[in-house]
Image (cartoon, rainbow, N blue to C red):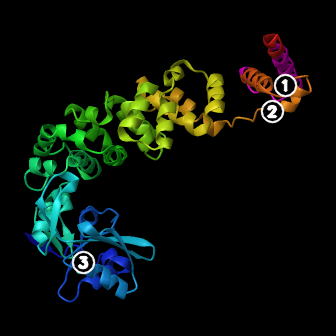
């Protein structure tokens, strides 16, 4: 075990809500420390992120002290030892030290304890098993400091045992590596993930979705996804073929265009070749309605962009709107095999920045004036006129619009008769 004051004076430890929570719980024989990802991030020079605090105090004592101090307390998981304290609108998750008595995934039975070593040993990865006290002393019972500095993601203890406790750790292993690791994923960990991959079928879609979407926007998403494909893990999660090449291309394209990483775009590149793929993945991962619609739109005839000129692209932009158009172009680009610096594809992708589609200028009244009756026929003639307006490249001159209206009315009349 090592204990070093390497975070002494860290602003998030010495002031604000974290300092207040630690002061509240470090009294009358109890102890509290910040644990997990916050400590890891601090060692890596990253923002602290969500603040998780462990304590020897039982949940009921945490609640009692919070109420006495006038701090809002939410029993978010009190049966498992977790309560959330809210200070100045920010949440601080406080969990009583635990040790597993029986382990079977998310339903593991735990007992509350006072042993910091056992609490660390029940966590997933060494760099997540660190804790720091109010004075900035970092406690390392599992070799996490060295692994964090080396950006090496390793399971605590026996990898097979850690995975059997919760099979989501297979996905977390690659996600944490994508976010914080360097080089190839740990070999022992990777082999354990392969051995335990049958357990992925026991996981809820919601948990897999959460980890997948986080992985896809991590800095090392490309390498992590390739490693998962080679290990035969991604196919099981998305229920079909995993296209690592288009994912790598999408990430490169986002970089070229200076775009914020999009988990939905990247998921489409990884898993969607046709709309049937989009529907399968949406069901498999229980995506939100917005996510499912975005994937379906991207997968719809994206290949037409391969031979699309700007006039046709403008018509599609008008139909889809800027966001849907942009995402579909990027998927087509990622799947085309073209370089990320392709000038042709960049021009198509940046069309919404150069051109704004006008509104269709003809109205129902224009066709009623030409003798069309209200009802389904009126809607049909408006559709015909809009199609003709698009084909004519969005004219706005009165003479051109009158000609389009006359032609659409004549055609609708002929079809009716």
Range of the magenta residues? Answer: 391-411
Q: Tags 1 and 2 in contact by the CB under 8 Å rule? A: yes
Q: Quadrant of residue 111?
A: bottom left
Mark 2 closeness class: few <14, some 14–19, many ≥20 residues within 10 Å: some
Q: Distance between the residues labelled 1 and 2?
A: 8 Å
What residue is disc 1 on?
Answer: 401
265 inside magenta stretch: no
Task: Please give left or right for residue 280 compared with residue 174 in the image.
Answer: right
Q: Which of marks 1 and 3 is nearer the N terminus?
A: 3
Q: Is mark 1 on a helix, strand or loop?
A: helix
Mark 1 closeness class: few <14, some 14–19, many ≥20 residues within 10 Å: some
Q: Distance between the residues labelled 1 and 3?
A: 73 Å
What residue is disc 3 on?
Answer: 8
Q: Residue at x 61, y 26 (%)?
A: 313
Task: Please give left or right for residue 178 compared with residue 105 in the image.
Answer: right
Q: Which of marks 2 and 3 is nearer the N terminus?
A: 3
Residue 39's place in the image compared with 363, above or below, is: below
Q: Which of marks 1 and 2 is nearer the N terminus?
A: 2
Quadrant, the N terminus: bottom left
394 inside magenta stretch: yes
Q: Tags 2 and 3 in contact by the CB under 8 Å rule? A: no
Q: What element carries label 2?
A: loop
Of residues 287 and 360, the one nearer the viewer is: 287
Q: Measuring from the top left, give residue 44's x and y in whole percent.
A: 26, 61
Q: Which secondary structure class fits the magenta region best?
A: helix
Q: Distance between the residues labelled 2 and 3?
A: 66 Å
What residue is disc 2 on?
Answer: 361
Residue 237's place in the image compared with 173, above or below, is: above
Of residues 368 and 324, the one nearer the viewer is: 368
Residue 303's place in the image compared with 235, above or below, is: above
Q: Measuring from the top left, give residue 333's x and y in whole percent.
A: 46, 28
Task: Please give left or right for residue 101 compared with residue 268 in the image.
Answer: left
């Amino acid at each position: 075990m090592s204990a070093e004051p390497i975070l002494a004076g860290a602003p998030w430890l010495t002031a604000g809500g974290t300092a207040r929570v630690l002061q509240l719980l470090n009294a009358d024989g109890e102890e509290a420390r910040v644990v997990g990802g916050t400590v890891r991030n601090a060692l890596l020079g990253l923002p602290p992120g969500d603040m998780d605090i462990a304590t020897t105090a039982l949940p009921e004592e945490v609640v009692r002290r919070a109420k006495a101090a006038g701090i809002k307390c939410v029993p978010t998981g009190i049966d498992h030892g977790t309560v959330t304290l809210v200070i100045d609108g920010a949440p601080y998750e406080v969990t009583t030290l635990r040790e597993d008595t029986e382990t079977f995934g998310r339903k593991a039975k735990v007992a509350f304890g006072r042993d910091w070593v056992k609490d660390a040993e029940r966590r997933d990865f060494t760099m997540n098993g660190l804790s720091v006290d109010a004075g900035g002393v970092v406690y390392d019972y599992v070799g996490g400091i060295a692994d964090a500095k080396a950006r090496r993601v390793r399971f605590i203890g026996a990898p097979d045992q850690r995975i059997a406790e919760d099979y989501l750790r297979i996905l977390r292993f690659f996600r944490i590596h994508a976010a914080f690791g360097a080089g190839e994923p740990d070999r022992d960990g990777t082999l354990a993930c392969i051995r335990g991959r049958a357990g992925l079928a026991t996981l809820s879609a919601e948990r897999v979705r959460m980890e997948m979407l986080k992985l896809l926007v991590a800095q090392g998403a490309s390498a992590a996804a390739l490693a998962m494909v080679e290990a035969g893990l991604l196919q099981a999660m998305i229920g079909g073929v995993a296209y690592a090449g288009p994912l790598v291309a999408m990430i490169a394209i986002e970089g070229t265009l200076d775009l914020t990483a999009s988990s939905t775009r990247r998921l489409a590149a990884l898993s969607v070749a046709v709309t049937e793929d989009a529907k399968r993945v949406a069901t498999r991962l229980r995506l939100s309605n917005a996510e499912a619609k975005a994937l379906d739109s991207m997968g719809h005839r994206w290949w037409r962009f391969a031979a699309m000129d700007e006039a046709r692209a403008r018509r599609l932009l008008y139909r889809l709107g800027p966001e849907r158009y942009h995402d579909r172009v990027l998927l087509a680009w990622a799947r085309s095999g073209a370089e990320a610096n392709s000038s042709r594809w960049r021009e198509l992708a940046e069309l919404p920045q150069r051109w704004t589609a006008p509104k269709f200028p003809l109205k129902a009244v224009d066709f009623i004036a030409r003798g069309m009756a209200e009802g389904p026929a009126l809607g049909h003639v408006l559709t015909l006129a809009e199609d003709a307006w698009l084909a004519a490249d969005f004219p706005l001159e009165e003479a051109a619009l009158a000609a389009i209206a006359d032609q659409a009315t004549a055609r609708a009349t002929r079809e009716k008769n």
